[in-house]
Amino acid sequence: MNVMISPISDCATGTIEAYVPTVEKPWNKQRAMHLLRRMGFGGNLDMVTSVLSESPSAVVDAIVEEAMNLPLLEPPVWADWGAEDYTDADDELVDHFLSWGFEWVKAMKAHGFREKFALFWHNHFVTQWQTYFCSKYLYQYHKLLQTHALGNFRTFTKEMGKTPAMLVFLNGNVNTQFNPNENYARELYELFTLGEGNNYTQTDITETARALTGWWVDNAACADPTFMPTWFDNGSKTIFGQTGNFDFDGVHDLLFEQRADEIALHICTKIYKHFVNENVSEDIVAALAITFIENDFELAPVFKQLFNSEHFFDEANIGVHVKSPLDFFITFIREGDFPINDEILTLMGYAASQLGQTLFEPVDVAGWQGHYSWITNSTLTTRWQMLTDVVGYLYETAPDSLRDFAKLLTNDSNDPAFITKTIVDHFTGRGLQTQADYQKATIVFKYEVPQNYFDDGIWNLDWEYSDAMVALLLFHIVKLPEHQLS
């Protein structure tokens, strides 16, 4: 049973033209944090201040360029291990799976945009570790996600089809002229490029499977993929009405030549739904698709155009996405700039897995459905409890970090209503819906401090128990419906 988060009507306006701040649509903290949340995993007050000192277009371009130039993660010692390199394969494989997932979570916390997009593509070009069960394949697959996250989509698609994790997961490694297997060919069209039923036929799938034959990987040996000429179907194939002896590269070239419009619309729709709004603006997607095609399927120009657009910054697109578990946890830590050690970060990755988002293990080939599917009666309390535990850990181990956070965010105010509203608004995309909601939060923050302490100015954030008061407010915030949204 899904728990509904307060729906917001689809009334977004604005065009694909670059956003230029106005009195009606100012370049303010709300929009800056919206940008940081959608292009990454949020940001602390220093990041927001830095962003606001630049124009929106300069910020977007800089974020994209920085992400494109970001070095890949250092390869682990087992990055090229074959079966012969293991001494206790079952335990070592699980250890590698868990440790590399943790490295990715750390990268999400440290960087943001590239990892946000690598995660997006992980849920597009889905593979499952339990199927290929090889550490080298895991690393190669993840490296491919990071390498092409903002690169050329056509190249990305070609490379993904040959990576061992995908060859094993969708049976490309057993697709031969003697026994063609259609699994990858079907998903290449249905999920990865065209969209379900979008201008392809069963015959196209069958003939494409023939064109993709010949690639083999010895999964048991954790070996590199090899092209086996004798396994390749060397006969004529007819795909999209075109006849020829298409091979792996040839069929991909044909796909992007003959179905460019369909690919562009499908991918840009998916990008829009994930990063802007579940309710798709066809006009915006159509404009993005034109940019995609005109730039020969380079992704960076599409991202820049989308995140620079006045439509993206429209208030109706702010705070309307249910955060994924990883987004929920990592964004909170980044926006609070809280001192979290590796042990707590590991527990957060584990909690995300308990909530259904296990890195390298999406639920099926279609991936995590996202949005409202992340919130159910059972998962909601786990989301609350995990962040409540994190706040409790901070209060026990670094209480001054809570006090200092509040002082920095509010310019050391001693007004409890102002402090409450400022902190609440910092962690929610659109703030709370009513003044009564803010008053309730203020009561939580004030706890049992006598009212005259506030009225007479006796109380301030240096007061002995102010760290506990901030903790109580954060306990309250993490359970708010508005905090589940980005």
Image: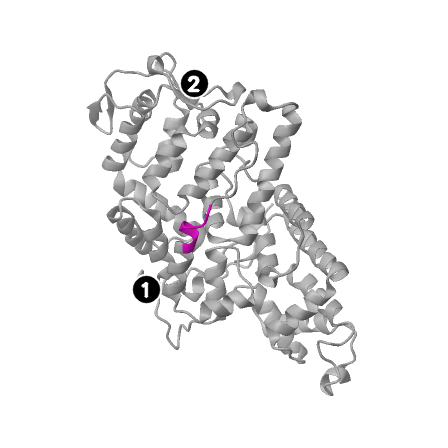
Inspect this view and state whether residue 259 appears: yes
Q: In this view, does 420 lie above or below 227?
A: below
Name which residue type carries label 2: Val
Q: Where is residue 406 in the image (x, y as percent from the top left)?
A: 65, 71
Tell me the quarter of the picture where residue 181 sits.
Answer: top left
What residue lies at 66% left-to-right and 23% top-to-bottom? 88
User: To which residue does mark 1 refer?
Assistant: 18
Asked if the magenta segment contains residue 69, the reply would be: yes
What residue lies at 61% left-to-right and 62% top-to-bottom? 336
The numbered dot on residue 174 is 2
Q: Within 10 angstroms of label 1, few (less than 14), some, or many (20 or more) residues?
A: some
Is residue 317 left or right of 330 when viewed as pictured? left
Between 322 and 248, the residue placed more toward the observer is: 248
Which residues fall within the magenta stretch?
A: 66-71
For the residues labelled 2 and 1, say whether their Cβ atoms are less than 8 Å apart. Answer: no
Asked if the magenta segment contains residue 129, the reply would be: no
Q: Position of residue 351 (x, y in %)?
A: 65, 45
